Amino acid sequence: MHFFSGQLNKIFYSGVCAVILLICFVMITQTDVYAVSQDDASINAKDIPLYKVPNQDAEIRRREGGDTGAGSAGMSRGLSRGLSRGLSRGLSRGLSRGLSRGLSRGLSRGLSRGLSRGLSRGLSRGLSRGLSRGLSRGLSRGLSRGAISDGLSNKVLLDQLHDASEEKKEDAHEKKEGGHGGGEIDPVHGGPATPDLMAPLASLQTGYTTNPQPTLWWYISSGYQSKVELTINEYGVIEPALETHIIGPPKEGISRIDLKDHGVTLKPNVEYEWFIVIVPLPSERSADFLGSATIMYIPPDEAFQQKIDNATKEELVFVYAQEGYWYDTIHHLCELISNNPDNKIYRKQRVALIDQVRLGKVKNYDKKAIDGKAIESKKPIESVH
């Protein structure tokens, strides 16, 4: 028995070591995998802003709707989640099984002893008392509870049917008025088709900003001129800081959300999580298509503020990136592209930044513009209520 136990322990520890080594290998090679490719490197290295991650060991907080194609990032994320879930589930199952076995053994022994004593002593008393009390209580409770519960359940069912019919009427009215803005129709739920990819232009870990009312940027792979839920949650607070909706853009692109327009001001040194959610089936929220990321307002110190004040618009992208302020970096670069849509240098810089935070396929949008296939002639459409 001890021999088999020892062998199992060896196998277990060997497996754990192998998984740890694999994670280390993936993390080491990620830098090379997501470096700017040769095709993108037609600009000098000094012209590429390098985003300095504030804390590389921090938890991954960004989520994308669809597949960004970031293979190794997905592998490392999967391995880390697998380990954490495996440990948590192992502990919970071990505790639950241990308790259940202990209770079952205790109950079985207690029942066997209790039955023998209870049968002899309790038959005479139990039968007489049980029959009399059971009949009287059963009749009274059955009549009262049965009538009330049936009445309540029927009322709830009628209310649900009424709500569902009203919701269908509203949806039909919106479609009649062009509420979904045209485009492809999903054959399952009848609304606009869900895009292949929707992602916040955010860092993997919590990104910093110097602005208490920053601009959030997000990408969508196809037009979706219907409601997109926008929610912002403050860490540790139950009620959301913002819960509203925006209207998606008419075509593929990168759009903006100005928190100033929504009256949201971030508290300093407090983490917030923001969500963009497409709800194909309101009755089945597990089918939601969402992207999310986290943000924190970190006021700049005096030296950093002086760098900001002395920098040009082009230099600001590099200043913010070097200090680890992702949201300011991407915002100022997106603004430069909005005002200069034909400038390929700015787009190549955004491709480089998107690679650095492992957003994979999102960079293809700018690559098409660089190749002259989809160069914008105006600013990206701003999401509105």
Image (spheres, rainbow, N blue to C red):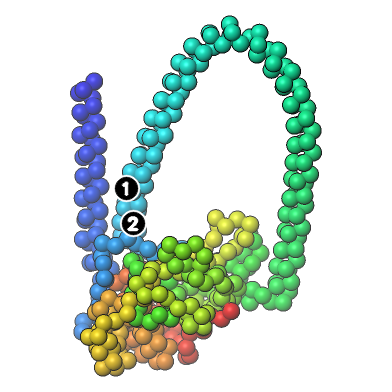
The crowd level at tag 2 (other Cα within 10 Å; few <14, some 14-19, many 20+) is some
- Earlier along the polypeptide chain: callout 1 or callout 2? 2
The percent coordinates of residue 96 (x first, y second) are: 42, 34
Residue at 23% over, 67% down: 32
Residue at the disc numbered 1: 83
Residue at disc 1, secondary structure: helix
- Asked if residue 121 shows in the view, the reply is yes
Residue 16: quadrant of the picture: top left
Residue at 74% over, 71% down: 173
Q: Amino acid at mark 1?
A: Leu
Label 1 close to label 2 by CB (< 8 Å): no
The percent coordinates of residue 337 (x first, y second) are: 39, 87
The percent coordinates of residue 181 (x first, y second) are: 63, 77
Residue at 31% over, 53% down: 80
Residue at the disc numbered 2: 77
Residue 40: quadrant of the picture: bottom left
Describe residue 259's horizontal placement relative to residue 183 as left or right.
left
Describe residue 188's horizontal placement relative to residue 303 as left or right.
right
On-image quarter of the N terminus: top left
Q: Is residue 246 above or below residue 20?
A: below
Q: Is residue 106 above or below residue 26?
A: above
On-image quarter of the C terminus: bottom right
Most foreground residue, 325 or 298: 298
Residue at disc 2, secondary structure: helix
- Asked if residue 253 shows in the view, the reply is no
The percent coordinates of residue 156 (x first, y second) are: 74, 50
Residue at 26% over, 71% down: 53
Q: Is residue 217 above or below residue 141?
A: below
Question: Label 1 to label 2, Cα distance in Å?
Answer: 10 Å
Q: Amino acid at mark 2?
A: Arg
